[in-house]
Image (cartoon, coloured by chain):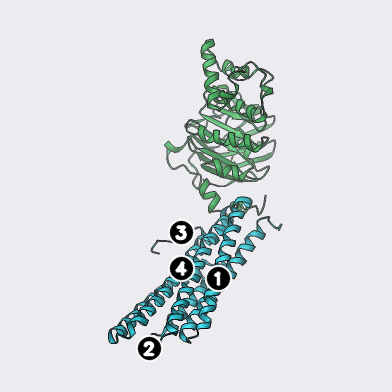
Chain colours: A green, B cyan
Amino acid sequence: MDDPQERETSKDMQSPNMISEIATPTLMKGIAEPKSEIETKIDIRRLNFFYGRVCALKDVSLTIPPSKVTAFIGPSGCGKSTLVRTLNRMNDVIPNTSVKGEVCIDGQNIYSPSTDVVELRRRVGMVFQKPTTFPRSIFENIAYGLRINDLAGSKTELADRIESGLKAAALWDEVKDRLKEPAQGLSGGQQQRLCIARALAIEPEIVLMDEPTSALDPIATQRIEELIVELKERYTIVIVTHNMQQASRISDMTAFFWLGELIEFDTTEKMFTKPERRMTEDYITGRFG
Amino acid sequence: MHKRLIEDSLTLLRDKLLIMGGAAEKAIMLCTRALIERDSDLATRVIREDDAIDQMELEIDQVCVDVLALKQPAASDLRFVVSIARTAPLVERIADHAVNIAKHALSLNNSPELEMGVDLSSIARVVQEMLVEGLDAFTSGDPEKARATIARDDEVDALYDRLYEKVIEAMKRSPDAVTSGAEWLFVLKHLERIADYVTNICEQIVYMARGQVIKHKIW
């Protein structure tokens, strides 16, 4: 390895014995450097990700602030979904992949051998492009996550957590009288909010959203966007979106990626009015992509 | 490179603003000639043609709203549309000042000619040049040219002060000159205000080109 401060993990290296401890890396200088420790929830340091030999993320460094919405934008194949999946190690389940670099949440490297991946995924919830409801009742869709995370407790506690999850996802009023009905009977937008409720019920700190509205109609999209803005008070939200208007509407920070590289990261206002980099300007104004 | 969907709208806005700017430029030229040459026909023409300029402002405003709503411009495109939306009312105000000067010309031309010692052409020339240079800077999107034009506002202010004093002196010398002297003071003020509006247009050009707000700033 060129840099002794980098380390590599792979699907075949998940055993703690196979992952070498490394020294704390120095912070990257440049646009992605955090302003202070307090403003950093997720600190990505020189992250490289490989599908086999193909490098999908190249030396990505950026800091994601807490209680904000951070949007990842860029053309297809730029690595934004890959990056978001590295934040709760969802890529671990993809064969023949490897990671180099660090992702620190609250200062702790999630790729360190001591990381409890189940606990990590409780702290870092995820919502996908298409609603991923289970073929069970609305109630059971949320209860499942609570049970596997040992958060179910008593029946009353379970019901309370389900209610607060549904309320946080602005779905409670619509489903409170039909919790035993199949989740798949809900509309697409409601199913997506159910997935958000499922993620929120286990009390995460961070919610990752990978194109959460791309399969929804404009009304359902608007509900989800309003919900995201409400949720940022309590959670750190990272959203991948192809819709630049959506990024400009709901995010506080925007990162633009191109061919696996972070091109620019700044406040959304700056990115959409006067980006520093010509490439960002060209992408945002539709000159390429 | 492919042609972006927004491109036609941006070109349309640019063209409309330049036509409007050209009309305002012509209005200034005609209203000052109306005064200098004591030609009331020219003054009447400026007043009559102002409606067309007002209409152009409304059209530009509508196109800006349409582009913002339908094309959702961002970055330099957004700054361009916002700058046009801010500039068109400034050009309209410039034309209104030309109309006011034309109205003073009608009044002065109906009175006997009095020697005020006011070389109106000196200040009018600089103001017209500023507008031409400002529109030129807009066409080329050149912030340096815009800044150079802004710097000329001091030249207009100095000429204004000097000519203002001359009119006051003339009014002091002769009570007969008071009525027309007051009209001349208004004319000078209108020209000085036009230069201020050109300055505001040039500030928009800097914003448009660089995203830098220089309004209300000493630079």
Seen in the image, is B176 located left or right of residue B187?
left
Location of mark 4 (residue): B197
Residue at the extreme front of the image, as rendered: B110
Calculate the distance from the C-alpha at mark 4 to the C-alpha at mark 1: 12 Å
> Where B216 falls versus B134 (above or below)?
above
Location of mark 3 (residue): B213
Instruction: Choose mark 4 or mark 2, whichever is in front.
Output: 2
Residue A15, image x, y percentages: 60, 23
Q: Residues within 10 Å of mark 1 (few under 14, many from 20)?
A: many
Location of mark 1 (residue): B21
Q: Decide which of tag 3 and tag 4 comes sooner along the chain.
A: 4
Residue B186, image x, y percentages: 39, 75
Calculate the distance from the C-alpha at mark 3 to the C-alpha at mark 2: 45 Å
Residue A115, image x, y percentages: 54, 25
Q: Decide which of tag 2 and tag 1 comes sooner along the chain.
A: 1
Seen in the image, is B65 located left or right of residue A67?
right
